[in-house]
Structure formats: structure tokens, C-alpha cells
Image (cartoon, helix red, strand yellow):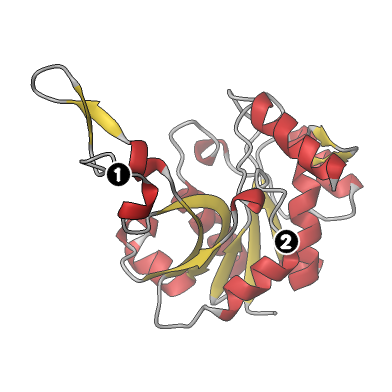
């Protein structure tokens, strides 16, 4: 897929789990799971690990995947957005004469996604949408609550506490797969997307590693597989 750029964003700073992108998961650096998936989709020339961190660069290049640039510091702060990172990557490749129609964004923190799932999500993409995004079915609406005006806890959606089955299906982004229309990204930015198509993934492949507990859970799943 030569018109597809795979972007794997890997900022050096992580407050929830320091160094998580290169932390060894069952003996392999976490980021390498996403590189392995990307390599089933396209060649290394179309894989962009965007990072500001030399340790991440060293780890990725030791794995045999060249890092095309060091991400500028202004795109590696707590306030820098994914939108900024993607536009910077596209700008870099266009500056060396390579243009892409689509971006496949693979966050390193979703190591349980499979190549088959990525291919299924890619099959949903067309040029007249903004993005295909992976989701998982959410149980949160059945238990989501807040304080009412009298200071009592009140269910937001499940007004009569009838259980999940009484509610329509809700989904939540799981962070695993994003297939992005480059033209729409330039024109509207991620926040302006209004033509999204969902790709539904099961709970067992939807874990997004944010802290040590997520990491331990994923490691246990991989070990028992």
C-alpha cells in the first residue's frame, strides 16, 4: 500500500508509566508490536515512527526500522496534539517528494490489535469519509452517574437502572486503529471530522496501556496465549 503512511507516535515523556513505549512486554519493546503490524501492511519506507526521544530511536533502529526524523520539541510537549504530529509527518514526507492519501495511525499502547483487524478496518475506508476509527462496545452508559441538584447520585442514561440490555448500544474509541484521510486532515483537522466510520473490536484486543496495571494485564494475556 504505497499511498498509505503508517505513523507510530512515540513521545519520550510518559507520566502514567515512564518509558512505556520501549518497556519490554514479554521480552519485546512495546513499540515493536506496532512496527510488526505495520510491516504486514506496507514496507518500512512507509512506516514513520515519530519521536523526540533518542532511546526510542535507538530501540526502533536496533529493531531494523529507520526513524526518518527527530520530532521537533514543540510537537513533543504535554500540550502538543496528535493533529500536530500527523501534519508534521505529512509535511516532512511532502518535503522529500512523497505524497500520501491516507494515514494509518497505530498507537504503541495497543499491542493486542491484530494485522487481520487492521486489514478489516482498511477495507472500510473510502475517499469520501474523514476517518475509520476503532471502537469497542461500552458498558459505561449503564452505570454513568453524576450529582443532581440535591447532592444525590443520579444515573445519566440508565434512568430506571434496568441494566445494559435496556439501553441502545454505545461505543468508545479504543485507541487501536485510525485510518485518516490526509486531505480532510489538512482541511479540517481531527477535531473537525464529521464523517467517521467505526470499526468494532472486541474487549480482549482493545486494551490501551496507560499505566502499570494495564501493562500487567496485557502481559498476562500474552503469556497465557
**For the residue carrying disc 2, how many other residues have a C-alpha within 10 Å: few (<14), some (14-19), or many (20+)?**
some
**For the residue carrying disc 1, how many other residues have a C-alpha within 10 Å: few (<14), some (14-19), or many (20+)?**
few
Residue 160 higher or lower than 199, as above or below: above
Tag 1 residue: 162
Residue at 40% over, 82% down: 128
- Tell me residue 30's x, y (percent): 77, 41
- Tell me residue 55's x, y (percent): 79, 33
Q: Earlier in the sequence, mark 2 or mark 1?
A: 2
Q: In which quarter of the view is residue 59 placed?
A: top right
Q: Residue furthest left?
A: 149
Residue at 63% over, 56% down: 106
Residue at 66% over, 52% down: 205
- In this rendering, would 123 be left or right of 28? left
Q: State the quadrant of the N terminus.
A: bottom right
Question: Which is closer to the viewer, label 2 or label 1?
Answer: 1
Tag 2 residue: 114
| Residue nearest the observer in this picture, 120 or 152 | 152
Circle 1: element type? loop
- Tell me residue 135's x, y (percent): 50, 57
* Residue 96 shows in the view: no
* Residue 113 shows in the view: yes
- In this rendering, would 88 be left or right of 31? left
| Residue nearest the observer in this picture, 199 or 38 | 199
Circle 2: element type? loop
- In this rendering, would 60 be left or right of 214? right
Q: Residue furthest top?
A: 151
- Spatial CA distance of label 2 from label 1 is 35 Å
Amino acid at each position: 500500500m504505497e499511498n498509505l503512511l503508517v505513523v507510530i507516535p512515540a513521545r519520550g515523556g510518559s507520566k502514567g508509566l515512564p518509558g512505556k513505549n520501549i518497556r519490554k512486554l514479554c521480552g519485546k519493546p512495546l513499540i515493536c508490536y506496532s512496527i510488526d503490524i505495520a510491516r504486514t501492511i506496507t514496507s518500512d519506507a512507509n512506516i514513520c515512527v515519530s519521536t523526540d526521544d533518542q532511546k526510542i530511536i535507538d530501540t526502533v533502529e536496533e529493531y531494523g526500522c529507520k526513524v526518518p526524523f527527530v520530532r521537533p520539541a514543540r510537537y513533543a510537549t504535554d500540550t502538543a496534539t496528535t493533529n500536530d504530529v500527523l501534519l508534521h509527518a505529512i509535511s516532512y514526507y511532502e518535503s522529500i517528494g512523497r505524497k500520501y492519501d491516507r494515514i494509518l495511525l497505530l498507537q504503541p499502547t495497543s499491542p493486542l490489535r491484530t494485522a487481520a483487524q487492521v486489514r478489516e478496518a482498511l477495507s472500510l475506508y473510502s475517499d469520501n469519509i474523514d476517518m475509520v476509527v476503532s471502537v469497542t462496545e461500552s458498558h459505561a452508559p449503564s452505570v454513568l452517574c453524576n450529582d443532581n441538584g440535591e447532592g444525590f447520585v443520579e444515573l445519566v442514561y440508565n434512568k430506571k437502572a434496568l441494566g445494559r440490555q435496556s439501553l441502545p448500544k454505545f461505543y468508545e474509541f479504543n485507541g487501536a486503529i485510525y485510518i485518516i484521510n490526509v486531505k480532510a486532515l489538512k482541511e479540517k483537522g481531527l477535531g473537525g471530522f464529521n464523517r467517521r466510520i467505526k470499526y468494532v473490536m472486541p474487549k480482549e484486543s482493545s486494551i490501551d496501556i496507560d499505566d502499570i496495571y494495564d501493562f500487567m494485564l496485557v502481559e498476562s494475556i500474552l503469556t497465557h496465549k
